[in-house]
Image: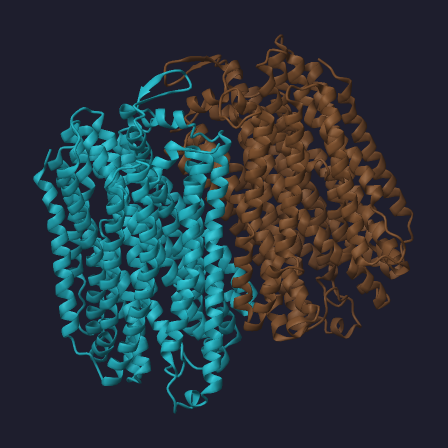
Chain colours: A cyan, B brown
Amino acid sequence: MHSSLFWLVPVASVCALGFAWWFYRAMKAAPEGTPRMIEIANHVRAGAMAYLRQQYRIVGMFFLGLTLVFAWLAYGLELQNGWVPFAFLTGGFFSGLAGFFGMKTATYASSRVAQAASESLDAGLRLAFRSGAVMGLVVVGLALLDISIWFLVLTRFVEDADPAHKLLVITTTMLTFGMGASLQALFARVGGGIFTKAADVGADLVGKIEAGIPEDDPRNPATIADNVGDNVGDVAGMGADLYESYVGSVLATAALGAAAFVSSGDTSIAYKAVIAPMIVAAVGTILSIVGIFAVRVKSGASQRDLLNALSRGVNLSSVLIFIASYFVLRALALPNYLGIWGAIAVGLVTGIVIGKATEYYTSQEYSPTRNISAHANTGPATVIISGLGVGMMSTVIPVLAVVIGTTAAYGMAAGNWHFTPDSIPHGLYGIGIAAVGMLSTLGLTLATDAYGPIADNAGGNAEMAGLDPEVRRRTDALDSLGNTTAATGKGFAIGSAALTALALLASYVEELKIAMLHNNQESFVLRSGEVVVTAYASITQFTDYFQVNLMNPKVILGLFIGSMMAFLFCGLTINAVGRAAGRMVEEVRRQFRETPGIMAGTADPDYARCVAISTAGAQREMILPSVIAVAAPILVGIIFGVPGTFGLLGGGLATGFVLAVFMANSGGAWDNAKKFIEEGHHGGKGSSAHMAAVIGDTVGDPFKDTAGPSLNILIKLMSMVSIVTAGVNVAFTLF
Amino acid sequence: MHSSLFWLVPVASVCALGFAWWFYRAMKAAPEGTPRMIEIANHVRAGAMAYLRQQYRIVGMFFLGLTLVFAWLAYGLELQNGWVPFAFLTGGFFSGLAGFFGMKTATYASSRVAQAASESLDAGLRLAFRSGAVMGLVVVGLALLDISIWFLVLTRFVEDADPAHKLLVITTTMLTFGMGASLQALFARVGGGIFTKAADVGADLVGKIEAGIPEDDPRNPATIADNVGDNVGDVAGMGADLYESYVGSVLATAALGAAAFVSSGDTSIAYKAVIAPMIVAAVGTILSIVGIFAVRVKSGASQRDLLNALSRGVNLSSVLIFIASYFVLRALALPNYLGIWGAIAVGLVTGIVIGKATEYYTSQEYSPTRNISAHANTGPATVIISGLGVGMMSTVIPVLAVVIGTTAAYGMAAGNWHFTPDSIPHGLYGIGIAAVGMLSTLGLTLATDAYGPIADNAGGNAEMAGLDPEVRRRTDALDSLGNTTAATGKGFAIGSAALTALALLASYVEELKIAMLHNNQESFVLRSGEVVVTAYASITQFTDYFQVNLMNPKVILGLFIGSMMAFLFCGLTINAVGRAAGRMVEEVRRQFRETPGIMAGTADPDYARCVAISTAGAQREMILPSVIAVAAPILVGIIFGVPGTFGLLGGGLATGFVLAVFMANSGGAWDNAKKFIEEGHHGGKGSSAHMAAVIGDTVGDPFKDTAGPSLNILIKLMSMVSIVTAGVNVAFTLF
């Protein structure tokens, strides 16, 4: 049961890490700029690393606690297999490592990009983009490395006479390392989101509005914290989020593949179905590197050229992946490989549609955002109302894209749209592989994403170091391009989270099966009296046995709780930003009051103090939402059992997805409505319309950068927790 | 198969209508006030009736179209029984009639309450409350009348040899008249909500903020429209909403009762289970009248006395209903009648808990709203952010109350918490009867609710007529009391909508059964090969047959669409308010510009023009959301069949409920945060904190009075549409 094609996975991992290293070295070799620029970059880097250390300390305690719990479940109660605690730990470790490298690169890059931009626009772009590519490649490289190692280790060490059963154990065990990635992502997104918005809102409220100094003014004590925030939120947070989606979709699809094909009796086919998503991801990684090299502009390029260059890279990679995956699937000779290939195409297209819809609703090039700007003429209230309206309307296309995409992927992979025990597992496998297809370009799309905050920081560096305004104009052009790619990237992150969560929800059944077998429940009895052998039970039989249907009140109650969880989680993170920002406002006011020399430019503000406040705020505030996100699936599982858990996951997924799109797009639209006014419309900067739009943007900050992205994690994490604690669900429920 | 207890239902109906008539006559006999007061009241009444005529015209066209469709489905395609079009029409007619009477009363009452308040506070309270009671009693009276007539007619004319089957046909046919009530409520809530907020926001934006004149100033051309809006939104809209919940919960419970007890073989028990919810509602109505008489204050009463008087009435009714329902259920001798009694108690308690939670999160007596006020010191952005945070957090208690209440009602009525085919139908019946229990005090709670806008209008009348400021102070005290009862009433409306929708969802299965029998599908085959006789199939067998489980992608896709529908519906209504308010702003500005005499007090503004603009705006804007709400369940049913429909209803219910609570409570909290500042905190009226809080309040207006309440209807209406078109779902689906 081996295919030489599998070796593509470690090879792609090494390629990705190798190129990441190469890009990193190239960036480090670039000139660092003036001593003042270096000093500022050092401040930001020190702040970012200080924050990361704090975050890892808290995450470490959580991991320690949960590892002990999992070890107790595995070795004490024998409710799950013994690999789980280790898989959990490595998932978290590799995710943390990717965040660390990505952020280190980003913080080294800022002054260098500012320096490059002082030479030419295209030099700035190239350096910023290559630095972003380090993050993208480290994420996919480490993910593929973790997958390769565990797959090889488990294939070798899991002992099971029945090869089919062995495959099921391997895939379901590997899935649990997604939980490690998930938890790491939770802290990165929630903590990073709180940090960055506390600093941003705090800096804006006192700096821009009260003191009337521009953004990134070195006199503002919170300005370094604001720049640190861009790194910890948009680089490390986004990276951890997508690392989790990437790992989760590949592993869930592998588990679904094992389940779909073992029943054919031919284990070698099942084996191929398991490695297919890994190979598609590997091929995607290699072709993403090709795409990275396709992003190049001639010197003297305009902003439109820059955007075209980025699009060209993404389009090229997508087309190449589409072609290459045909040959991969044909070589694997899976049954109905054309249908599976179709599902991959569906995933690629769905990602693009969601990205385009996000762009439409949040870019000032289109009417929704322009309408919000027009409402600024009647004051902040109408800006807020219309922004909320736009965000709500913007949920329609992404939801329909996911619905149509999922239906298409299901039908293609299953070969029909029937809901028979034979076709469901193949259809679910199709949904999983569509998610893998969507994420296959991650190495590149994450590069275009991480590029944004790097350009933003370069702009901050240029401003604070007092460089020629022309340099700032160039970095602003890079930053503005970054805003477009960031909006698209956010849509992509949400869409992939939804598809990944769907695949995880489907693979939860597989975990239940393994958990029942682990508990020596070799067979079970359906309501009809039929006796079913657990190992060969169909999904329909499982859902029948557990009564996971919508007339079961437990399922409905789970749905209610799931929907509520999404709102509760948002409320907690939004309130956290409010509190942390309030503390930042007090600190900035205090510094202005106690050191009058700051505003006069004769005294340096205490940047470190502001960084420390954001760090402490994020650290304190990330704990409660995290505990709730982990505890809810466990509690619901204990109280309402498997049906309640399914309801919770379904409700959390549906509401969380729609709510996340709403929040991200409202926030994005407010941001760009403000930019549209700053471009000179409706009175331009300083007009009352601009003031109203700034208020909209401030409201949007926690929407788009804290609560919205945190929901991506919530919907995946709750599934992951349920997957890992499936053994408990099977062993014990209250009702 | 008759029980003399049934006659309590028409008797209660006649009592309710009789007392309503008596209160109405008493109100009409009260002194009308000065000629100026009468003139203003005439303006408001003319505007309200003009609006109502327009609304009924559009509603009439919708009803005509849908009646033709249902007639074609019934007589052309023979997909449903022939009574449906008529039942649908009467449901709509009686709901419309209740709205008409309620609004007529409210508009006659305003000047009289102002006049009474000029005598004493308690005289004002008594008159306002008795006028509100007209609305409450007309709603429950007409609902019970419609129920009595149809039950008697169908019992007599439905021909079916099998008494059990006859009972199923009667109850499922009656359920379809809920769809008429539902559609009427949709237009009343959406149209009324858009009207009132277009007028309110428009009046505030130009009047308070631009021209700097106080609320209800007669120089503001939109002020009459604003007062009309209170009537069409808060009286007619709220009444139609609760009429629908009331009718829906009673009829759904009757259908669930028939389903639960026919299988016992003893049709007389099933008959009793069917009439039990009707009798509980009837007894509740009679005891609500007792409660109305218990609301009395001594002359010279303080505001606290007023609130205590209202609470005393509600508490007395609740306790009496709790006691009386024991005797009713014992007299009916239903099996496990103590459990059913317990479910009624659970419903009463759940309603109270949700009301209290709403009060906690939205009253300035408690910390959440006070914290929002404190955030006004840092400007509108932090007011908005903290209000959204409070609204999101406030979803936790209502959701948990519904979850715990539902679980308790299910377990008590079923006698256990097992999910067996024997226990589910009884448990679902328990959930339905809990909803009936919650709504049994409706005659009284609706009176306390309708009282608010009447007091508000009386204040407007006093202000515009230039009465002694002491009168305005008294009507303000009445109004402020109205705000507390309105917030509680909103929580009650949402909670009862959720429970009613749950009961409707459960009774959808019964409609499917009848539709299948109607299509001569006498039996069906399960996946296991088992052949099941349709008439005796259990809920578990139905959900198995239709594959309504959460691993069916169609269910999950339905969930996504349902969640999206809630947001889309909110987005549409919020944008509608924005547009309609924009037109109002232009009109008010035009009048101030073209007739300078208005501000000087020498020329009368053109009030009628503003009323016409709000009317036209509401009329135009209510169509699209309504069409979407009706079309979505039909389309999803055709495309994704029964599993997709279940997903849609479940997703819409869970997300819609949580979203509705969030919007209503955010809006209520902003409103009272502003009031708290106006009471003299954080700088009081005119401070920058006050300006920030006014912006929060303006954002909250469409939240709490348009989008939020409209969601109540959406979650019930979608179930109703699916129930009525169950025949189509069974006959044809695409996938």
Query: Does B524 sit left or right of B475 as displayed?
Result: left
Corner quadrant of residue A510 = top left
Q: Nearer the viewer, residue A690 or A2?
A: A2
Residue at 37 percent across and 53 percent down: it is A357
Toward the front, the furthest residue is A76
Percent across and percent down for residue A220 are 41, 80
Q: Nearer the viewer, residue A323 or B441?
A: B441
Quarter in which the N terminus of chain A is drawn:
top left
Percent across and percent down for residue A275 are 17, 39
Q: Please, is residue A277 above or below residue B463 in the view?
A: above
Percent across and percent down for residue B197 are 64, 56
Percent across and percent down for residue A401 are 36, 44
Residue at 61 percent across and 9 percent down: it is B162
Specify whether residue B43 is in view.
Answer: no
Specify whether residue B395 is in view.
Answer: yes
Q: Nearer the viewer, residue A323 or A47?
A: A47
Toward the left, the furthest residue is A4
Q: How many numbered circles are shown?
A: 0
Toward the top, the furthest residue is B161
Corner quadrant of residue B201 = bottom right
Q: Please, is residue B482 above or below residue A262 in the view?
A: below
Corner quadrant of residue A445 = bottom left
